[in-house]
Amino acid sequence: MKKLLPLLIACCCVSAVAPAFSADQVTLRFSWWGGKARHQATLEALKAFEAKYPDIKVKAEYTGWDGYFSRLTTQVNSGTEADLIQTNWNWLTLMSKKGDGFYDLNTLKETLDLTQYTPASLATTTVNGKLNALPLSTNVMAFYYNQTTWQKAGLELPKNWDELIKAGNVFKEKLGESYYPVFAGEQDSMLMIFSWMYQQNQKPMIDIEKKRLAWDHADIVKALGFYKTLIDNHVLPSTKVVASYGAKITPHYELKPWMNGEWAGSYNWNVLYPSQSITLKNPSDLVLGPYPMFPDARDAGQFQKTALMYSIGRNTRHPKEAALLMNFLVNDPAGILPGGLERGAPLSKIADATLREKGILKDSDPVIAGLLQSFAVPNAFAATPFMEDMQINALFTAARENIDYGKMSVEEAASDLEQKANRILRRIMR
């Protein structure tokens, strides 16, 4: 069976690590965000680390997602960030434009075994020649569907965009007004629209060199017009419908329409499959669907990126000890096994081999299957972190809301988005 592209080479042992440390007791701070399962898994791994290295204690600083980035920004600006930090790929453009926002991991090769990672994966977290973070896993946007609801509608899972669009009115007529074929949140809607656009013209949304949108006005009108088509054909619940459930912050998989099977699918990160499926009455109802493609599409335009990362704070007083902790979590079976798949399918070769040997990582798992599907379709599009910028996402959300609430036409919303997006891109990319 085809294995994950970044994880092809299995390794039997961890490279020798022989750091020279002070005999004095060292206390490290480690900050991360996540849910209960990730917290518990990480705490178990930290217990194993302290048992192996009794002279190093770890103070765990963990929270949910909400507010984590703003808190980290404040800490970095004041020089009070943790020694080891869970970070996000797109934060590098905001916090380390010149590569000096985090500790350069290249200087810690004697402690941190970087040979377990492909050069290509490390390149995604290298800024100005400095390795700002260790990439933990890969995320990809994929369609997952509640197969039971689709069966009630008498439909097969859609194989192309036309079938997805036609399914909307079938759901409405056969199952009722509250039923929709798929849900897509704020960023997810933008990335779905981008994929639809890119399959037709292989044109990026952002011009990195010119520091502006690569899409011209006609492109933006076409993109927002597609969104309106999805809404008009009852394919997605509109922002107005979603707001009626108080879902501005609450994840869609914690809302009743999702749990009841009324929102019968999602366009979301593959790594979120466990969170989405567990809230259903029957979690196995959620299955990976075909990726919709135009017949003549040369590229899927499917957003694939480095997912979670580990960085070492640039102000740490204990860089080697922090690197030892990082190495333990990603390259030592004693740290790998407690963490399991809580941070996605690992890019570390030894972690991949360890989890496969224990039966924890399987290609049939829907999370892994989503990645394999992405590797199987033509998908050469190179993602840019600027597409995940919070301000750019907010502009697309505002455009969708203006259309849904009848405040602007598609043409007007496109003009507004174009003007504001170019102003933001000039500022954040300078």
Image (cartoon, grey):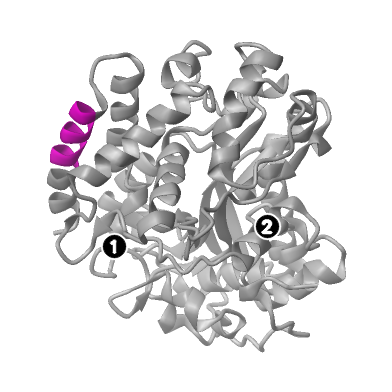
Number of numbered discs visible in the structure rendering: 2
Looking at the picture, which amino acid does disc 2 mark? Leu
**As drawn, is 402 to the left or to the right of 369?**
left
Residue at coordinates 62% horizontally, 16% vertically from top-left? 172
First of labels 1, 2 by sequence position = 2
Query: Vertical placement of 50 versus 189: above or below?
Result: below
Residue at coordinates 72% horizontally, 65% vertically from top-left? 336
Taking the view exactly as shown, the residue that stands out farthest to the right is: 358
Instruction: Tell me the element at label 1.
Output: loop
- Identify the residue position indicated by label 1 in the image: 96
* Closest to the observer, 266 or 92: 266
- Identify the residue position indicated by label 2 in the image: 46
Query: Vertical placement of 364 versus 407: above or below?
Result: below
Residue at coordinates 54% horizontally, 67% vertically from top-left? 378
* Closest to the observer, 381 or 202: 202
Residue 31 percent across, percent down from the top left: 51, 50
Instruction: Note whether residue 343 is visible.
Output: yes
For discs 1 and 2, the disc positioned in front in the rendered view: 1
* Closest to the observer, 6 or 320: 6
> Does the CB distance between marks 1 and 2 fall below 8 Å?
no
